[in-house]
Amino acid sequence: MAKSKATKPPKKPMAPRKKAGMPGMRGVDHIGLTVPNVDQAVEFFVNVLGFEEFYNLGTFSHSKGTWMKQYLNVHPRAKITNMRMIRCGAGPNIELFEYEAPGKRRQMPKNSDNGAHHYAIYVDDMAKAIKHLKKHGVKIMGKPTLNQGNAEDGEYWCYFLAPWGQQFEVVSWPKGRAYEKWYTRHLWDTRNPAA
């Protein structure tokens, strides 16, 4: 395992900040993800990662006007050609979209690009998870790395790519992370979703 060290460990942990925010906010319901091919994505999410497929939302478009631009911030003639809802264990649902649109950008963003993102999946055993991904031909980025000397000390992580180039990460902290000793309230944790 590789090791990742903070440049300067924190001298004093920051206090968690919470403002009043949106009335009635309970948590993340779903994450929307546009992919080149929904059927390919469902195959990967279900048969490689272990997600659960739920329902097909069909297609959607507006042939006139600016509804698509006004409500979804896409080209007015964009068409959603396939939509699917999937569930990831104790995490948020994912709504998959496949679009046809004039001027559609097909290149995946790099982690350093504005608007870039990745999805982290908690696993109980990092070595077994990586072995499983490799068995399915998934491209692993580097090797599992252990965070040290920062708030996430004790966390193992490793990036990998979906077949269409989307960035994902597997994470595991079987003995917890350093920040958990600093605060009485903790980040949401897939191991104990109700906490």
Image (spheres, rainbow, N blue to C red):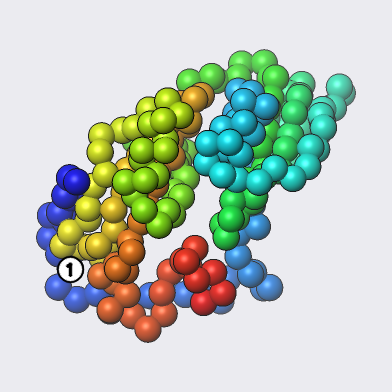
Observer able to see residue 104: yes
Identity, as a three-letter code, of the amino acid under mark 1: Pro
- The secondary structure type at the circle numbered 1 is loop
Measured as percent of width and height from the top left, residue 6 is found at: 16, 56
Q: Residue at x 33, y 80 (%)?
A: 183
Measured as percent of width and height from the top left, residue 38 is found at: 66, 28
For residue 160, what is the image quadrant? top left
Query: What residue occupies the far top of the structure in this picture?
Result: 102
Measured as percent of width and height from the top left, residue 186 is found at: 41, 74
**Label 1, on which residue?**
10
Q: Residue at x 12, y 60 (%)?
A: 8
In this rendering, would 193 be left or right of 64?
A: left
For residue 105, above or below residue 43: above
Measured as percent of width and height from the top left, residue 120 is found at: 44, 48
For residue 159, what is the image quadrant? top left
In this rendering, would 26 be left or right of 18?
A: right
- Nearer-the-camera pick, 109 or 95: 95
Query: What residue occupies the far bottom of the structure in this picture?
Result: 184
